[in-house]
Image (cartoon, rainbow, N blue to C red):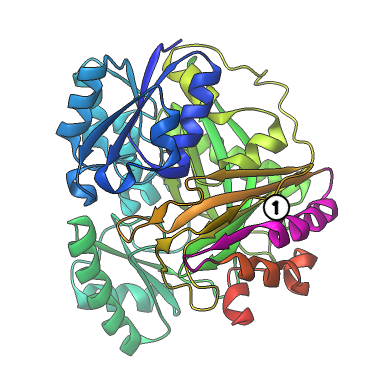
């Protein structure tokens, strides 16, 4: 097993990885920016290294500073968490070229899945269903118009190098396409350094369902069930649950088999997620993208399958067998995760500030993965995620009841936060029925 681990991230995910590392007797090393010096993950690590100013480009995306910290502390491995450099193939290669262990999939798999057009084509070749769309980037506006006419409106205009719900627009006709194409292309060039754009069919009423996969050290790829991720704002997730209320045993078998094929197609190792769009009426699903890292919502899978995904990541990276029997995977119970963000609960605009009061809920079936505590300052430099409230139980009904009590008990004063939104959602009949889709938040507003 790895003996020392540098966590190249911050906040709740750094704290989460550090917790498992210390439980396993692994020396946990944190890196932090000047803005994060007082956050819990810094003090909870066995050792912490300041790597730069608040700007992520000068700290959490600063490859030289991170590698220097690893060298100075004698770290044996690097865990990238999610975001920042976690899906940067060149960083993965650099880590391994430096003689360190990369706790994640291989750089080739990251590269293959990082370009959405290449990923679509690979998945289609592997027999994974993909939505109608372009097999090459739309080179210019005329090409996009021609492709959209062949696919049929409405269409989604997507940045080929995008991710995290960014770099996407919907066009219901040619006039809208002309506007969205230029907008998405400019955004993609600015944010990702790659203006390539793809066009694919847009489904107005659809569910977002994903499958957790794990590529084992022996070369096998296994699927650890599905997660429902349809509660979203601006194409970014707010709530995840497992199992999905929309997935029957027959559909689950097809979803999981497709996800395994996806992982096998790129020789996948370590944790990853195959994201799909699901038509709840027909039961058809289509590959959306593969996230080549640990997901924010991994705790719901951990509960339903009774495993620690971070531990499994470390075991794969160490060349060890998993803690579970890959041939006897069986889900049990239900889990829902709510992302507690520093944003107003109506328009979801960021709201940084000093946390004057921070009281986490407790009780049976309640887990809080937090990045902050009372007295900390939420700065505008990073993602607005404050904590994840995970509620578990034997049934979905039991989880909903516990979730209402947990949300009512979660007290945050200072920065704006979306806790009131979750109280509203948990009382929403569409959500409680389980028959919701990605438009639920818009309908609530």
Q: Is residue 202 magenta?
A: no
| x and y, in percent, of residue 443 in the image | 62, 81
| x and y, in percent, of residue 129 in the image | 52, 51
| x and y, in percent, of residue 408 in the image | 72, 62
Who is closer to the viewer here, 237 or 69? 69
Asked where in the image residue 339 lies, by quadrant, the reply is bottom right
Note whether 163 is above or below 168 in the view shown.
Answer: above
Who is closer to the viewer here, 207 or 36? 36
| In-image side of 97 versus 278 (left or right) | left
Q: Residue furthest left?
A: 64
* Count of marks overlaid on the render: 1
Q: Is residue 185 visible?
A: yes
Note whether 398 is above or below 186 in the view shown.
Answer: above
| In-image side of 399 versus 244 (left or right) | right
Answer few, some or many: residues within 10 Å of disc 1's Cα (few below 14, many 20 plus, some between 14 and 19).
Answer: many
| x and y, in percent, of residue 157 in the image | 35, 70
Magenta stretch? Answer: 394-417
Asked where in the image residue 110 lies, by quadrant, the reply is top left
Question: Residue placed at 76% from the left, 61% from the top?
Answer: 404
Note whether 151 is above or below 223 in the view shown.
Answer: below
Question: Residue placed at 42% from the left, 44% from the top?
Answer: 11
Q: Is residue 219 visible?
A: no
Question: Residue placed at 32% from the left, 72% from the top?
Answer: 147
Element carrying mark 1 = loop
Q: Is residue 410 magenta?
A: yes
**Which of the image's four quarters has the C terminus?**
bottom right
Circle 1 sits on which residue?
244
């Amino acid at each position: 097993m790895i003996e020392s681990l540098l966590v190249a991230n911050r906040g709740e995910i750094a704290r989460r990885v550090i917790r498992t590392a210390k439980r396993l007797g692994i020396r946990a090393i944190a890196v932090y920016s000047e803005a994060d010096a007082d956050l819990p993950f810094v003090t909870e690590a066995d050792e912490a290294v300041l790597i730069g100013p608040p700007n992520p480009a000068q700290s959490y995306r600063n490859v030289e500073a991170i590698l220097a910290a690893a060298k100075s502390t004698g770290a044996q491995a690097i865990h990238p968490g999610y975001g920042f450099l976690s899906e940067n193939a060149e960083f993965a290669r650099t880590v391994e070229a430096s003689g360190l262990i990369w706790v994640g999939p291989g750089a080739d798999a990251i590269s293959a899945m990082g370009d959405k057009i290449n990923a679509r084509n690979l998945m289609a070749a592997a027999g994974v269903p993909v939505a109608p769309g372009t097999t090459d980037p739309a080179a210019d506006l005329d090409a996009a118009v021609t492709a959209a006419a062949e696919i049929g409106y409405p269409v989604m205009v997507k940045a080929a190098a995008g991710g995290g719900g960014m770099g996407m627009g919907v066009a219901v006709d040619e006039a809208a396409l002309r506007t969205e194409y230029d907008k998405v292309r400019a955004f993609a060039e600015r944010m990702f350094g790659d203006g390539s754009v793809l066009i694919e069919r847009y489904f107005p009423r659809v569910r977002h369902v994903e499958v957790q996969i794990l590529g084992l050290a022996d070369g096998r790829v296994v699927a650890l069930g599905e997660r429902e991720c349809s509660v979203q704002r601006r194409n970014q997730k707010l709530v995840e649950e497992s199992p999905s209320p929309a997935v029957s045993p027959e559909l689950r078998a097809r979803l999981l088999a497709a996800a395994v094929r996806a992982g096998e197609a790129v020789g996948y190792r370590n944790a990853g997620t195959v994201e799909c769009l699901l038509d709840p009426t027909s039961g058809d699903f289509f590959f959306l993208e593969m996230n080549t890292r640990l997901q924010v919502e991994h705790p719901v899978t951990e509960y339903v399958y009774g495993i620690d995904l971070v531990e499994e990541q470390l075991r794969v990276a160490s060349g060890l067998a998993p803690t579970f029997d890959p041939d006897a995977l069986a889900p049990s119970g239900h889990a829902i995760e709510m992302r507690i963000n520093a944003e107003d609960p109506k328009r979801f605009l960021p709201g940084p500030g000093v946390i004057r009061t921070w009281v986490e809920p407790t009780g049976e079936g309640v887990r809080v993965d937090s990045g902050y505590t009372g007295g900390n300052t939420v700065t505008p430099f990073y993602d607005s995620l404050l904590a994840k409230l995970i509620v578990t139980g034997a049934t979905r009904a039991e989880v909903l009841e516990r979730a209402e009590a947990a949300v009512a008990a979660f007290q945050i004063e200072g920065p704006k936060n979306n806790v009131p939104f979750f109280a509203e959602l948990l009382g929403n009949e569409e959500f409680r029925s389980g028959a919701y889709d990605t438009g639920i938040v818009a309908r609530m507003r």
